[in-house]
Amino acid sequence: MAEAPFGLLAELTHRCPLRCGYCSNPLELVRRRDELDTGQWFSVFDQARALGVLQVHLSGGEPLGRKDLPELVGHAAGLGCYVNLVTSGLGLTEERLADLVSRGVDHVQLSVQDADRAGADRIAGVRAHDHKLVAADLVTAIGVPLTVNVVLHRRNLDNVAGLIALAERMGAQRLELANTQYYGWALRNRAALLPTAEQLAAANPVVAAAQDRLRGTMEIVYVIADYHEAHPKPCMHGWGARQLTVAPDGKVLPCPAATVIADLEVDNVRDKALADIWHDSRSFNAYRGTDWMRDPCRGCARREVDFGGCRCQAFQLTEDAANTDPVCSLSPDRGTVDLILAAETRPVVEPALVMRQADR
Ligand code: SF4
Ligand code: FES
């Protein structure tokens, strides 16, 4: 029997005031009318807690877009869960934040698009940057820990020093500098987002120096640009191992991007108990552990280190999720990634960023 999950990513809605082209939400966004209602989310939280979940990440889209967010926070906190609000900051007022914190928000994760207003608003597709500065002030003033999250790509990677300085000014305890992962809208925009090897070579020592300088003050988590690496990321710390995602329409996913795997049979909390899905469903058991692995992963010393990489990436690049992640230098498909890097990091004509679809 699988061990209990530690965290629940509750994607309350796909609606979002921002239109970032690096978004990992699916191209086909869930519509408002198909979202779980308040009572259904209460039931998800009850079942997740009974299953062993201790951390609830309220995410989206923009969770502030849900009018029932205060009730949802109160319910999750009332079960004893640590509640993390993952937000763009747009729509966060002093009153709203005070209400959410009084009901049990323990931590706020705020997204930032770039180091300066012009660049950030260009990436967000709307005027957002100034709202984020205000949101950060509100969060630190009320005394809740703040994580600043930045998705890095070709259009902001050169500003990594400025991004670190901005997070310091915002009073963040933690900064996540996460190179773009190519799912959903980000995959659609990959040719406009993939950084060059030179950009990464320049940014990496800047991040390492800041990690040293800020140790004990602001933790900096750096998520690698996996296409440029010789080994894949240990995606989700293994499939169905630690966390589950519930999408806005109730689909229960082993990882947030799992709907990209076209042949994965996905269950829904409207039809089945969460515990049954976690323990017994085909989707969660498909790539759990190591028994599903083929060569070269099967006999590889790193199979418990990176779990064969990312199933979604394997599917997207090889059309079979059971293949070794083609980022791996041992994969027979590594050539696919090298061709993408050669073609897309230096396009002859710089492609326009396709902005994420507006709310429906
Ligand atoms: Fe990881 Fe598989 Fe590559 Fe080994 S062969 S390093 S387990 S992805
Ligand atoms: Fe789905 Fe990596 S994003 S397994």
Image: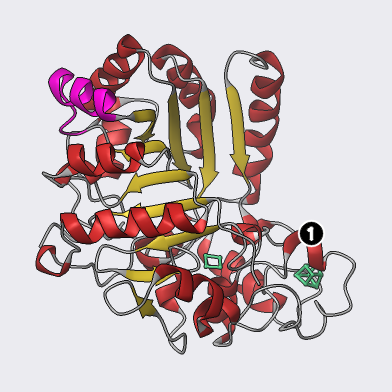
Give percent across and percent down for residue 132.
27, 26
Kindly tell me whether mark 1's CB lies below 8 Å from ligand 1. yes
What residue is shown at x 25% (from left), y 36% (from top)?
A: 121
Q: Is residue 236 above or below residue 270?
A: above
Give percent across and percent down for residue 238.
65, 64
Give percent across and percent down for residue 180.
49, 52
Does 69 sit left or right of 322 as displayed?
A: left
Residue underneath mark 1? 305
The residue lying toward the viewer, choosing from 313 and 97, is: 97
User: Quick check: is 244 in the magenta stretch?
Assistant: no
Instruction: Give the residues drawn in magenta, as a range.
Output: 90-103
Q: Secondary structure at mark 1?
A: helix
Q: Farthest residue to the top: give it.
A: 141
Q: Is residue 133 above or below residue 253?
A: above
Q: Quadrant of the N terminus?
A: bottom right
Give percent across and percent down for residue 324.
70, 77
Q: Is residue 315 above or below residue 289?
A: below
Residue 23 shows up from this direction: no
Secondary structure, magenta segment, majority class: helix
